Amino acid sequence: MKGRIFSILVAVLAGMLVLACAKQVALTGGTKDVTPPEAKASSPENGSTNFSSKHKSKYIIVKFNEYIKLNDVSSKLIVSPPMEEKPVAVVSGKKLKIKLNTTQLKPNTTYCLNFNDAIADINENNALNSFVYAFSTGPEIDSMQFAGTVFDSYTRKPVDDAWVMLYKDFSDTAVTTKIPDYITKVDKKGNFYINFVAENDYKVFALRDNNSDFMFNLPEEGIAFIDTVFRPAVEVSYDTVKAKDSLKTDSIVTKYNYTPDDIKLLLFKENKTPQFFKSSKRVKRNYFELVFNFTQYEKYNFTVPGDSAVFVWANDNPDTVRIWLKDTSLIASDTLKIFAEYVDPAFPDSVHYDTLKFRKQDKLFPDTLLTMKLSKEKRPDSDYSILFSQPVETFDASKLTLFGAVDTLFEKMDSRVEKDSLNPLRLRVVADITEGRKYRIAVDSAFATCIYGYTNKADSVDIVPMRETDFGALKVIFQDDRPYFVELIQGDKVMAHASVSGKEASFVYLTPGKYDIRVVEDENQNGRWDTGDYSIHLQPEKVFYYPQQYEIRSSWEHEVTWENKE
């Protein structure tokens, strides 16, 4: 019995020893593959000539060194010149098969099939960038090239979703009615590169193509054009490379520089989209918001049948119109119509008439209280203002009292109250409120009465005026007399705007921070940027940006001398 127990113990200990010695490690499978597939051979050969007569097979076959797959090839494959029936690409193991309709090939033409990064290995998805298969239906392969960048004409940022097209046809209607002779798509940085181009004269366009027909024929599409005619060329140069060994002869290296290689295209969208209301909402029974699809610079008129006292308000150059009903029976009505009459900026010779119908509201009952907002701050460049929730009809200035601190006490000060001419929701308090002193505003109930007869509740607030040294100033100086205006931008918001007068644009009381500086050459001097119009060969107004963000510091007077580098 003892021997048997001993044998069992020995077996258990031996098993534990084996487990202890057997170190467990994860199976790694070796070094990770980071190399994209490599094309080893093709049939017919890449760069073939006399393609139509030589191509007897149903497919073009490209063999790779590993198993491959295609990623979004339908959108990434670019054929130049474009074909009406686009080639079909499929994968079979390590082979790429390309089927095309040879009956649509033009004679003596070089075709380029650019797969961009659609081809990748099947395991790690390593993409082969810009794989190109080219062939010619004639005896020679065209070898000229075009290169450049597409920018947004307003933001001057690179455009990453545009096509660049070459036309041998110089007529104005070519880009609107014909397929281009050569085409490519920009990369993520806006750069484009068209190779295998025949030596000829071309006009160059960029297009944001919304209907995938490679023609500029929709109002929402973006276009860039240059009236200059370009002819591709190659410049040959020779460099001498000194031999490292004194016994050997220096070698000559031939360099080829293909031009044009720095074309800059400025893409814009024409102002030919008809204006309409992109939203219309009955927020409350008595309150409506109508939003145009873009800023309304022209005149407008809104009427509500049965309500001659309706209150309509919009900011200068508005895209949102606010309407308050006054008639109580219409406010109580579940259905209502508003008639809109406005001039379309895209078609200024015509007037639009819209009927907006409303059947429900978001909030069942209108507000029965006039709310009031008293700010704790007061800027040195503006009067103190009080904001209300609804348009103010009347106010009683005797129910507002301004106090100024003297030591620890507050003394009553002179002040007057005025309506803001631009904003019916605001009243301005005009008084000698200066920095370095505390103030208090006390407002009694029923100080203001809105268009519905509702009044405010009493309230008060202590004010500490902002100091002039809390702000910075900027002067932009120009060296020519062109009609510029300057905008200071944070993010996508214009924080300040100034026209140039006497070769200077001045900004005061700027909140410290970093700003982008945008300069617009305002050719028609209307104070805003205007886009172009291809039909009359009008380019957009020129826009320039300071090369880096400019930091405004408090209590500093900054100065920038502007140099245009077009």
Image (cartoon, helix red, strand yellow):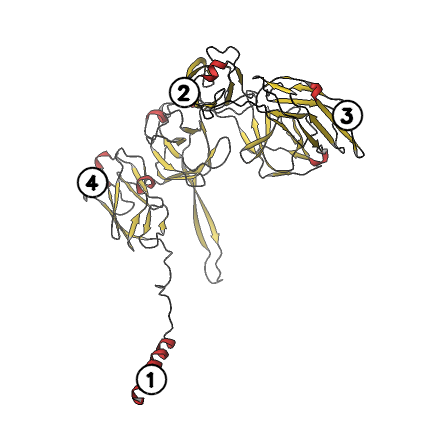
Q: CA distance from mark 4 to mark 1?
A: 83 Å
Q: Nearer the viewer, residue 41 or 499?
A: 499
**Circle 2 residue:** 359
Q: Quadrant of residue 83?
A: top left
The answer to whether residue 251 is seen in the rendering is: yes
Q: Nearer the viewer, residue 194 or 453?
A: 453
Would residue 83 be found to the left or right of residue 423 on screen?
left
Q: Earlier in the sequence, mark 4 or mark 1?
A: 1
Three-letter amino acid code at the position of disc 2: Arg
Q: CA distance from mark 4 to mark 2?
A: 69 Å
| Secondary structure of the residue carrying numbered label 2 | loop
Three-letter amino acid code at the position of disc 4: Ser
| Secondary structure of the residue carrying numbered label 4 | helix
Q: Is residue 76 shown above or below 525? A: below
**Circle 3 residue:** 412
**Circle 1 residue:** 10
